[in-house]
Image (cartoon, helix red, strand yellow):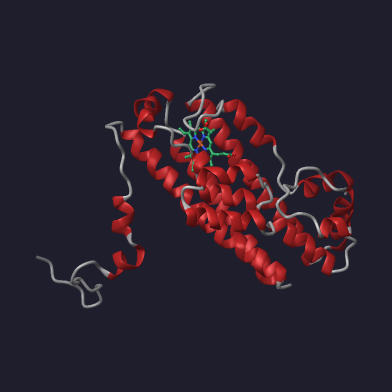
Amino acid sequence: MTALDADAPDLQYAGRTPYVRYTNSDVLRDLVRPQTEEPLEVTFVIATQIMELHFTLLLHELHRAIDRLAADDLAEAQAALDRCVVTQNSLISSWELLSVMSPVQYNRFRESLGKASGFQSFSYRELEFVLGAKNEHMLHPHVGMPEVHERLQRSYDGPSVYDAAVALLHRRGLAIPRGVLNRDLREPWIEADPALVEAWREVYGRGDELTRLADTLTAVAERHSTWRFVHYTAVRRILGAKPGTGGSAGLAWLKRTVDAPVFVDLWEVRSVL
Ligand code: HEM
C-alpha cells in the first residue's frame, strides 16, 4: 500500500459523506429508473431530468429578475437575467445527449412512457407563463397536484418578466399607455403594441442600462425560441409525424408553439432601428 500524503483529503466518514448529504447525489442516482433494456432509455431519462433541473434554475432566476425589476433594482435584475442566458445556453446544449438517438432506439422504450409527455412538465409550463405565454387551459393537467397547481396559478396570475420590464420603463419616464400598465396579467403577449415598440425604440437610442436590459431580454427570448425549435427538430428526427404520447398531433401541434413569439415588441422594434 502506498502511504498517504499529509495533504491528502479526509478519507474516513460515518454514513453518507458530507458531499452526498449536501448534493443528495445518492437520491439523484436513485431517480434514474429506465424501464427497458434499451441502453438509450438511460440517456433519455437523464437528458429529461437535466432539462427539468435547468427549468428549475431558470425559474429561480426569472422570479428573482421579476422581483428586482419591481423593486427598481435594475443592477440585480440585470445580473439575474444574465444568469438566465447562461442557464439557457446550458439547457439548449443538453439536447446534444439526444442527438445520437434513432427512431428505432426510441421505439424500443416508447411504450414504457405510457401517456407521459413533456407537455405535462409543470416547470416548463411555469417557464412559459413567466415569459408571458399565458394559457389557462395549460393549468388543467396539474389540478390533481394541489401544491404544483397553486404555484402555477400564482405564476399565471402574476406579472411575467416582460410585464415587470414594461412597468420599469414607465417608472423611468417612457410613454407606456395606461391600458398596457393596467392590462389583465393573465392575458398572453401575442401582438406587438405600437406604443411599446416606440418605447423600446427610444430605449435603443439611449445606449444606457435600459438598452442593456432590452438586449438581455431579447437574448432570453431568442434562447427560449431556440429550445422550442431544437425540441421540434429532435421530435421530427426521432418521432416523425406520429402522434405524441401526450395525445397531441405531435409535430403539427408543436409547430404552432415554435412559431409563437416571445417578447414580440422587442423583435418588432428591430425593423425601425
Ligand atoms: C425522444 C425525444 C422526444 C420526443 C419524441 C418528444 C415528443 C413530444 C411531442 C410529440 C410533444 C407534443 C405533446 C404530446 O402530444 O406529447 C412534446 C411536447 C413537449 N416536450 Fe417533448 N419530446 C421529446 C423529448 C423531450 C425532452 C427531453 C423534453 C425535456 C423536458 C421535452 C419536453 C417537452 C415539453 C416541455 C413539451 C410541451 C411543449 C409546449 O407545451 O409547448 N421533450 N414532446
Image location (x, y in percent) of residue 31: 33, 49
Q: Residue at x 55, y 47 (%)?
A: 124
10 lies left or right of 197: left
- Most extreme residue toward the left is 1
Q: Residue at x 31, y 56 (%)?
A: 27
Q: Which of the two residues, 82 or 1, is positioned nearer the viewer here?
A: 82
Q: Which of the two residues, 2 or 120, is positioned nearer the viewer here?
A: 120
225 lies left or right of 234: right
Image location (x, y in percent) of residue 198: 89, 53
- Most extreme residue toward the bottom is 6
Q: Quadrant of the N terminus?
A: bottom left
Q: Residue at x 65, y 44 (%)?
A: 135
| 194 in relation to 160, above or below | above
Q: Residue at x 75, y 47 (%)?
A: 189
Total residue callouts: 0
222 lies left or right of 227: right
| 115 in relation to 216, above or below | above
| 188 in relation to 39, above or below | below
Image location (x, y in percent) of residue 150: 54, 57
Image location (x, y in percent) of residue 221: 68, 48
Q: Which of the two residues, 15 or 189, is positioned nearer the viewer here?
A: 189
Quadrant in the rendering for residue 173: bottom right
